[in-house]
Image (cartoon, grey):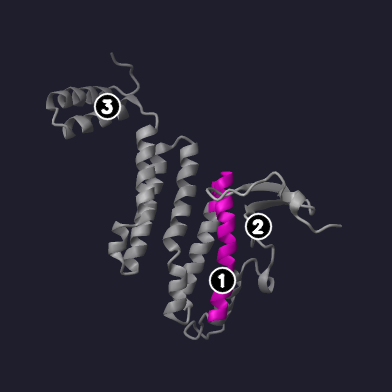
Amino acid sequence: MSKDITPVIEGWDYRPERPAVRQILGQDGKPKIQLRLDLGLLQMEVTGRPDGNRPFGCETMLDYYSGVLREKVENGDGNDGFHLSEEDCMKLQLESTQFYHRRISWLELGEYAAAERDSEHNLRIIDFVMKYAQTEQLREMFTQWKPYILVHRTMARARRAWEQKQFDEAIARIEEGIEAISATYRDQGREDTAESSGEIAYLKKWASEIDQTRPLTVEQRLERELREAIASEMFERAAVLRDRLQLIRQNPGKKLP
C-alpha cells in the first residue's frame, strides 16, 4: 500500500492566515483531529496526549513528573532535592507544543471547553517548571509563552459565553484574562510591558467590539446614551435619560410609554 499522503490532503489547502482543521474517524473507530500544515498534516488524539502516547504509563509527561515528586514527598524526602533537568524540560516543552497544536485546533472547531482544558494543561506545565527547573534560563524558556496561552484560555471562555448570548459574561471573562496577563507581567518584573502588550490590546479591542455590537435592552441602551450625553456635556438630555432610566427601574417588566 502506498504511503503517499497526497490523496489524504488533496483538495484541502493549507491557509497561513488561520488554522485549517477537520475531525475524522480513525481506523480504530475513535475520533481524531487533523491540522493542515504547509508540508502535510498533523493528526492528533482528542484525549490525553495529542500523540496518543502514555509516557512511563502516565497520561501525560506532566503527570509523570508530578507523580515522581509526589512519591518523593510521601517517602519523607521532601521536595528540596527535586529538580527538572534540561532534558526533563525539553520533554515538557515537546508536550506543550503538542497541546498547543490541539488547542488552536479546538478553537477553530468551536470546541471551547476542550480548548480551555488544553490551555490549563500548558499553564500547569509552566507553573511546574517555574518551581522546579534547575536554571533561570529553563524557566524563562517557558514563562515567555504564558501571556499567549492566557489569551487562548480567555478566547475559549469568552467565546463560549458569547455563543450563548451571555454578552456581559463574555466581557467579564475578557477582563479576567486581561488582569491575568497583567499579573503575569508584574510577577516577571515587567510592568512596563503590559502597557504595550499586544495580547492585552487585542483583548481590549475584542471586549469593545462585543460591547458595541451586542443587542441591548432598553435599559442598557439608555445607560449607554446617558454616558455619552454626560461625556458630551449635554446635560439637559442627560437629565431626561436619567429620569427615563429611573422610571424603568421602578417598574421592572412593565412596558412604558
Please, what is the dominant secondary structure of the magenta stretch?
helix
CA–CA distance between discs 2 and 3? 54 Å
Q: Which residue bears the numbered disc 1? A: 92
Circle 1: is it few (<14), some (14-19), or many (20+) Cα within 10 Å? Answer: many
Residue at point 22% right, 25% down?
Answer: 246
Magenta region: which residues? 86-115
Q: Nearer the viewer, residue 28 or 166?
A: 28
Asked if disc 2 and disc 3 are in contact, CB closer than 8 Å, the reply is no
Residue name at image x 16 percent, y 23 percent: 237
Mark in the foreground, 2 or 1: 2
Any mark on residue 39, and which?
2
- x and y percentages locating residue 47 in the rendered image: 65, 57
**Label 1 – label 3 distance at C-alpha:** 52 Å
Q: Secondary structure at mark 2?
A: loop
Mark seen at residue 222 = 3
* Magenta segment includes 231: no
Count neighbours of disc 2 (C-alpha within 10 A) and say few if under 14, some if 14 to 19, many if 20 or more.
few
Which of pointers 2 and 3 indicates the residue nearer the eye?
2
Seen from the viewer's position, the closer of residues 137 and 17 is 17
Any part of residue 111 in sight: no
Q: Residues within 10 Å of mark 3 (few under 14, many from 20)?
A: some
Determine the residue located farthest toward the top in the rendered image: 257
- On the image, the x and y values in percent for residue 4 come to 78, 57
Q: Are marks 2 and 1 in contact (CB under 8 Å)?
A: no
Sequence-first tag of 2 and 1: 2
Amino acid beneath label 3:
Leu
Residue type at numbered disc 2: Leu
- For badge 1, the amino acid type reads Leu
Closer to the N terminus: mark 2 or mark 3?
A: 2
Whether residue 241 is visible here, answered yes or no, is: yes
